[in-house]
Amino acid sequence: MIQKLIEKIQKTKAPICVGLDPMLSYLPEYLLQKSFDRYGETLEGAADAIWEFNKAIVDATYDLIPSVKPQIAMYEQFGIEGLKVYKKTVDYCQGKGLIVIGDAKRGDIGSTSAAYAAAHIGKVKIGSNVFSGFGTDFLTVNPYFGTDGVKPFVDVCRENDKGLFILVKTSNPSSGEFQDKLADGRPVYELVAEKVVEWGSESMDGNYSNVGAVVGATYPEMSRILRKLMPQTYFLVPGYGAQGGTAEDLKYCFNEDGLGAIVNSSRGIIAAYKKAPYDKFGPEHFADASRQAVLDMAADINRVL
C-alpha cells in the first residue's frame, strides 16, 4: 500500500494529506442551515452538513493531492449518523482515487486489536460472506500496549495490502510528558521508533515499509534523529501550519530522494476561508479557498525539498 501512496505523491508532486476533521464551527452558516432545514437541528442534520462540506472540499482538491485523513472522532461525536458519514466520506474519497488514512489511533491487545484491525483495514467474515467495515487504506495506531497490541494490525496490514502509521513523536505540546522521558538513557520515542522499524520489516513494499510513523513537524531536531533511525519508514507529519510547524521544520522528515514523508494539514485547509489570505473567497466559495490553500502548501513544501 505504501507504494500506491508514493506513486500518488510523485504524480501530484504534493506530499500532502488533507485532514478531513470537520467541526460545525468550520462550516459556512448557509451550508449548516440547509441541512437543518432538511433534518432539523439534530444529529442527522449535523452529519448531513458535514457530508456536504466534505464533498465540496474533496471535489475542489482531489486532483491536487494524493491523500486525505478523516479523524474519526469528529464523526463519532454525532453518533451513528456521524459514523455513516465517516464511511460515506471514505468511500467517496477512494472513488476519487485518493488514498484514505483513517485517523482512529486504535490500540489494545489480542482479539480486541484484531477486531479493530478488521474493522478499519481488514475484513470480517459473516457466515459464507466477507465484508469490509470502514475500508480505509491506512490506519493510525497507538503503540502503548507494545507488540501484543501492534502485531494484529501488522498481520492484517500484510494480508490485505494496507498500511499503518504508528504514533512515535506527536506534535502536541504535552507529548514530551511521556515520549521524551529517558529509559535506559534514551528517549522513549527513540525506543518506539526502533520497534516500528522491527514491526515494519514484516511488511516491506519496495524501499519502504507499509508500517509508517507519526512524527510531528513541531519538533524538527527530533525529526532529524528519527529520520536516521527509520530510513525505510514513511512519516505522517502533523503540526504544519495551524500548530506552528513550518516548511523549514519539515525538511528533516524527508529522505534525500525527496520521499519519506507526507504532511497533514486539517483546519489550515478545510477552514481556510475563515483566515487571511483566503477570507477574500468568502463562505460561499469555501471550497475554492481550500483549493488555493492546497496549492500554496504544496509550493511551500516543495520550496524546501
Image (cartoon, rainbow, N blue to C red):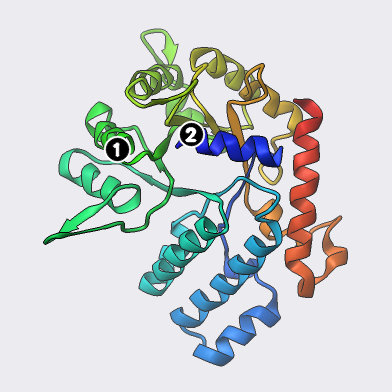
Residue type marked 2 = Ile
Relative to residue 237, is residue 12 drawn left or right? right
Residue beneath disc 1: 153
| x and y percentages locating residue 234 in the rendered image | 52, 28
Which residue is drawn at the image coordinates 45% and 79% (left, top)?
A: 43
Instruction: Characterize the local packing of mark 2: few (<14), some (14-19) or many (20 or more) Cα atoms within 10 angstroms.
Output: many
In this view, the residue in front, 155 or 245, is 155
Residue beneath disc 2: 2
Q: Which quarter of the picture shows residue 6? A: top right
Q: Which quarter of the picture shows residue 237? A: top right
Are the two marked residues, 2 and 1, in contact with CB atoms closer than 8 angstroms? Answer: no
Residue 193 to residue 213: above or below: above
* Structural distance between the alpha carbons of marks 2 and 1: 15 Å
Quarter of the image with the C terminus is top right
Instruction: Characterize the local packing of mark 1: few (<14), some (14-19) or many (20 or more) Cα atoms within 10 angstroms.
Output: many
Q: Is mark 2 on a helix, strand or loop?
A: helix
| x and y percentages locating residue 274 in the rendered image | 76, 63
